[in-house]
Amino acid sequence: MEANQRIRLAIEESIQFLESTSQWETAHGENSRHKWDGAWWHMAALYEMGEVRLIPESVIARAKHLLETKVWRTFVITADDQPTNESDRLKMDCCHCELAVFYMILKAYGCDVDTELPWIREWFLKHQLPDGGLNCEPEAYIHSRKSSIISTLPPLEAILWHTDREFTEQEAAFLDEGARYLIEHRLVCSKQRGGVLDMDWLKPCFPRFFEYDILRGMSFLAEWSRRRNKALPVDLLVEGVERLKIYIEEDGLRIGRQVHDPHGPWGGQTFPLLEALAGLGEVSPYLTGQLDRIIERLGPAFAYA
């Protein structure tokens, strides 16, 4: 009860901040994504909680305006992709995962993003690499041609979770190739060497924003299988649940990592809602719900021990 009250108060603080901040208007909006107290992070936390409708409409309008007027709509890979005039040089650059989270916030709110900002969905589909994923490092498109799991999941989720019609042929291929990428990497492993690429990915994390953990990949594959009528990768999902068992309690799944860990790579200023949601060792109802949906999809294939 005390935790719920703390979260409610923290939500109110975030809403007040979003209503009062001038971050959307300053310079080219760069401050809006300042880790971890920029407006983007407050909105993303509310989205991940399933509370995106609490964001004031005026704030959504300002976020859309930023994307419409202050973002360079090209992912800069070569010199030819860079802006050439002074006004465009002042625009904010975006990466795949940041843009995908922005897209999901607006879509979940009810915005017709594909009509008003059609370039965003086109951006995701355009930047899939031959291995099936994406990479926010431009050099990958010139040299290694290898994807990043972190960069890959948000664009995949944007298309999978926020398409309320039949997938186009291009979208279906995008999702299927993304699923192949995750399956070939066994969610967390090197395709060549077989070992876990990052042990932190085995620790449930919430809120995630752009970050990856194994449950995020599992959730995508379970929903991809359902929406695309593809075979469920049962063995891989069972293996994933087994990897998570040290965090599973009778009342749900515990948080094993904080994306804003001051001793980790993304340390920075936090805000009350982030702190209220991300207590290490605390059972997260949001992560528990994701795990329960995966186990439900597995059905008789998995005996919950």
Image (cartoon, grey):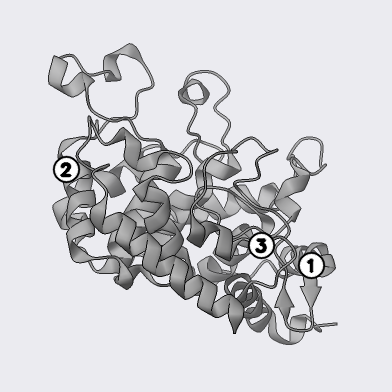
Q: Secondary structure at mark 1?
A: helix
Q: Residue at x 69, y 60 (%)?
A: 204
Distance from the alpha carbon under mark 3 to that under mark 1:
13 Å
Residue receiving disc 2: 68
Q: Nearer the viewer, residue 227 or 51?
A: 51
Quadrant the N terminus occupies:
bottom right
Mark 3 or mark 1, earlier in chain: 1
Q: Amino acid at mark 1?
A: Tyr
Where residue 297 appears, x then y in whole percent?
63, 80
Mark 1 or mark 2, earlier in chain: 2
Q: Secondary structure at mark 3?
A: loop
Q: Nearer the viewer, residue 232 or 77?
A: 77
Q: Is residue 78 left or right of residue 257?
A: left
Task: Kindly check if marks 1 and 2 are in contact, taking CB atoms under 8 A apart as contact.
Answer: no
Kindly tell me whether residue 170 is visible in this rendering. Answer: no
What numbered label is drawn on residue 279?
Answer: 3
Where residue 111 appears, x then y in whole percent?
21, 63
Residue receiving disc 1: 247
Q: Amino acid at mark 2?
A: Glu
Q: Does residue 305 sit above or below 227 in this rendering?
A: below
Q: Quadrant of residue 172?
A: bottom left
Distance from the alpha carbon under mark 1 to that under mark 2:
42 Å
Crowding around mark 2 (Cα neighbors within 10 Å: few <14, some 14 to 19, many 20+) is: few
Q: Does residue 82 sit above or below 113 in this rendering?
A: above
What numbered label is drawn on residue 131?
Answer: none
Where residue 248 appears, x then y in whole percent?
78, 73
Q: Residue at x 28, y 14 (%)?
A: 80
